[in-house]
Image: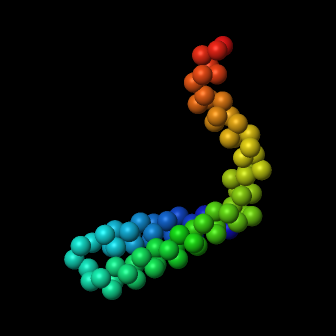
Amino acid sequence: MELKELTDLIAIRQYVINVRDNPTLERSTVKQMNGTLLLLDKKIVDILISKDFKEYIGYENVQKAIYEAARITNIKSSLNK
């Protein structure tokens, strides 16, 4: 998994959104951009849920991260201390 591919796809996705939202474009072009956006999202998600990316971000620790985030943001539990 190459991180540059992911960041490039995200940049292209943003460009496609900008083009799609351009009010001067023909409807057929907007329709193509909507399809392109769906395909880009699918490709980006495929990369994000891939084994390589999960290893890169240390996904095996996700439950611990969720627990820590919940602990830090739980206002009631911090008031009881």
Task: Judge whether 19 appears above or below 65 on screen.
Answer: below
Residue at the bottom extreme? 28
Q: Residue at x 58, y 30 (%)?
A: 73
Residue 31 image-quadrant placement? bottom left
Q: Residue at x 71, y 58 (%)?
A: 54
Q: Residue at x 46, y 78 (%)?
A: 36
Q: Is residue 78 left or right of residue 52?
A: left
- Where residue 68 sits: x, y (%)? 68, 34
Residue 20, visible in the rendered structure: yes
Q: Is residue 24 left or right of residue 67?
A: left
Q: Is residue 53 left or right of residue 15?
A: right
Residue 2, visible in the rendered structure: no
Residue at the right extreme? 60
Q: What count of labels does the image hold?
A: 0
- Where residue 17 sits: x, y (%)? 38, 69
- Where residue 44 sits: x, y (%)? 57, 68
Q: Residue at x 68, y 68 (%)?
A: 1
Colour scheme: rainbow
Q: Nearer the viewer, residue 34 or 18?
A: 34
